[in-house]
Amino acid sequence: MLENLAQEMQAKVQVMIRVTPGVEAHTHEYIRTAQTDSKFGIGISDPLLLEVVAQLRNSTVLCLTGFHCHIGSQILEEEPFGLAVERMMGLMSKVGKELGVCVTELNMGGGIGIRYTSADTPLTPQQVVRHITDQVTAVAQREGLPLPALYVEPGRAIVGEAGLTLYRIGSLKEVPGIRHYLSIDGGMSDNPRPALYQAVYEAMLVEKANQEPTIKVHLAGKHCETGDILIKDLLLPPVEPGDILAVFATGAYNYSMASHYNRTPKPAMVLVSRQGVFMLEERETYEDLVRQDRIPMHLRS
């Protein structure tokens, strides 16, 4: 398809191949992306991969520049990155020896984790890059390969801890002998990660940060789903309706994953910096939600 489009447009297009290197990162199964059984990319041991490389080698409009992989998200260890480098560099050596194709770029994707809770001990981007570059250099020397242009994608590591989400506390429900549920004015429509793959967060009451915790609660979202629990077993000081709760490390994969579930308007997004306070996204209204709705004429009466 891409080759046909390029021919129609009389354009030369640089392409990379997404490869599944068969590395199972130690993270939630829903955000692992490089294991053999994955919807992403072409398996590194799949004969189709060499066929595609050969096809690109013979193309007059498509130019293969390199390979790309992404082993998963919220990775807190060096080992998976190193193993992925070993396999991807091995692939570059193989296509050079067997097909005479020299690719010049290697994109190792992202996946660098952040500190969502006090139990997380993330690597710094510098540590990850140093480990990857050391591995690339070692394999290149061993295999006699030129050093490729190397890319990484540290998105979450850049913005994740820079953001937080503020919720207003609603009611407190006690199930005697079992637990307390504390309702908030948001939930899985603004942060689906806990419901999707049991993501864990920490939070605090903004105006009671120095008070000792006295109650353990399940932080219950506003949506009609039993699974809309933002944080389980959260320890808080005495709470009252109207209190403001801050949930930390929501700068990545929150607003970008937000939805209008239950026809819920999205909240505002505000930038706070030394230069001042700036509105980035206006709070949506119900009028915003129905602006694109259309009712067929025969249903209007």
Image (cartoon, rainbow, N blue to C red):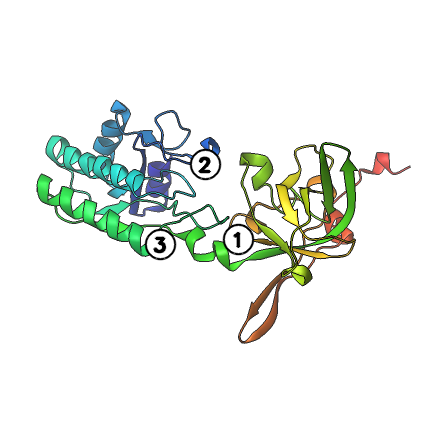
Q: Are marks 3 and 1 in contact (CB under 8 Å)?
A: no
At x 38% / y 40%, what residue is drawn? Answer: 5
- Residue type, mark 1 in image: Ala
Q: Are marks 3 and 2 in contact (CB under 8 Å)?
A: no
Q: Tag 1, which secondary structure? A: loop
Q: Which mark is residue 124?
A: 3
Quarter occupied by the C terminus:
top right
The picture places residue 227, in percent across and down from the top left corner, at 65, 33
> On the rendered structure, is 33 left or right of 22?
right
Q: Looking at this view, is 184 or 102 the one in front?
A: 184
At x 69% / y 48%, what residue is drawn? Answer: 186
The picture places residue 73, in percent across and down from the top left corner, at 42, 41
User: CA separation, marks 3 and 2?
Assistant: 20 Å
Numbered circles on residues, count: 3
Task: Name the mark nearer the viewer: 3 or 2.
Answer: 3
Q: Tag 3, which secondary structure? A: loop
Of the image marks 3 and 1, the number of the one nearer the N terminus: 3
Q: Tag 2, which secondary structure? A: helix
- Residue type, mark 3 in image: Thr
Name the quadrant containing residue 33. Answer: top left
Please indicate, yes or no, whether residue 58 appears anywhere in the rendered image: no
Name the quadrant containing residue 74. Answer: top left
> On the rendered structure, is 123 left or right of 66?
right
The picture places residue 47, in percent across and down from the top left corner, at 25, 23
Residue hosting label 2:
31
Q: Residues within 10 Å of mark 1 (few under 14, many from 20)?
A: many
Residue hosting label 1:
249
Name the quadrant containing residue 242. Answer: bottom right
Q: Looking at this view, is 57 or 270 the one in front?
A: 270
